[in-house]
Image (cartoon, rainbow, N blue to C red):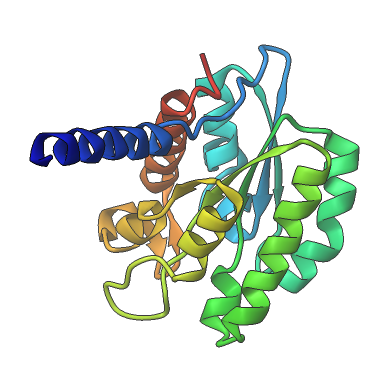
């Protein structure tokens, strides 16, 4: 009886672990497009256009990466333009990095989460996959705000949870308290590139 219980437990654990490993992204074809959507960290405040993360990512992936970042944008405004960006660009993948300005300005995170969820649903309605970049809470040495892991779980998204917070804790990667320098955006682009490879978006 004990041996049978152990076998059942082993099968259950194995099945669970396999289920966790099944999260992947569809490959972005060689002529495909990635939409980098967000605020100043996507736009590239602090560096020249050629040194922002979407430009570097385009070189790394050998894919077209459209920079749809607007400095200072909050998620409410991002949601208002998101659908149009999707329809104009028709990307194979969206890299969604928004919410930082909501957090800095003390907005209600329930509304921020609602806006981000609406963006994700707009993408999914068009069969466009989303890679979510988490933003840290407004605290010293803080980790990712809880809404990002929640969204990733609810929508089965690949999440870069510690990327932004780890870079913000490293003064050598920053051009000011909330933006990166050339090395920071380079590290950011390479980290996203590695995620795209890990989750099979880039083969």
On screen, residue 92 above or below 144:
above
Query: In the rendered view, does 30 fall on the left or right side of 78?
Result: left
Comparing 165 with 40, the one in front is: 165
- Rendering quarter of residue 27: top right
Q: Residue furthest front?
A: 1
* Residue at the spot 42% in from the left edge and 80% down from the top edge: 138
Can you give x and y, in whole percent of width and height, for residue 121 in the image? 75, 53
On screen, residue 130 above or below 83:
above
Can you give x and y, in whole percent of width and height, for residue 199 in the image? 47, 28
Query: In the rendered view, does 70 fall on the left or right side of 139?
Result: right
User: Is residue 74 visible to us here?
Assistant: no
Can you give x and y, in whole percent of width and height, for residue 33 in the image? 72, 26
* Residue at the spot 51% in from the left edge and 52% down from the top edge: 133
- Rendering quarter of residue 145: bottom left
* Residue at the spot 33% in from the left edge and 67% down from the top edge: 143
User: Is residue 119 visible to us here?
Assistant: yes
Can you give x and y, in whole percent of width and height, for residue 63 in the image? 64, 20
- Rendering quarter of residue 9: top left
Q: Could you tell me which quadrant the N terminus lies in?
A: top left
Comparing 156 with 85, the one in front is: 156
* Residue at the spot 61% in from the left edge and 86% down from the top edge: 108
Comparing 157 with 50, the one in front is: 157
């Amino acid at each position: 009886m004990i041996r049978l219980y152990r076998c059942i437990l082993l099968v259950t654990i194995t099945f669970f672990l396999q289920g966790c490993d099944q999260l992947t992204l569809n490959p972005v074809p060689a002529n495909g497009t990635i939409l980098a959507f967000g605020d100043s960290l996507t736009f590239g405040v602090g560096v020249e256009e050629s040194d922002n993360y979407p430009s570097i990512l385009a070189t790394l992936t050998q894919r077209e990466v459209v920079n749809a970042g607007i400095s200072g944008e909050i998620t409410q405004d991002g949601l208002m333009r998101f659908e149009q960006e999707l329809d104009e660009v028709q990307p194979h993948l969206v890299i969604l990095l928004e919410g930082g300005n909501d957090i800095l300005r003390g907005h209600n995170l329930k509304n921020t989460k609602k806006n981000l969820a609406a963006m994700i649903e707009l993408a999914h309605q068009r069969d466009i996959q989303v890679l979510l970049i988490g933003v840290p809470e407004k605290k010293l040495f803080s980790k990712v705000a809880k809404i990002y892991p929640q969204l990733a779980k609810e929508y089965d998204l690949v999440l870069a949870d510690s990327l932004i917070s780890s870079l913000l804790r490293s003064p050598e990667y920053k051009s000011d308290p909330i933006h990166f320098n050339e090395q920071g955006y380079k590290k950011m682009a390479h980290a996203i590139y590695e995620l795209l490879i890990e989750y099979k978006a880039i083969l």
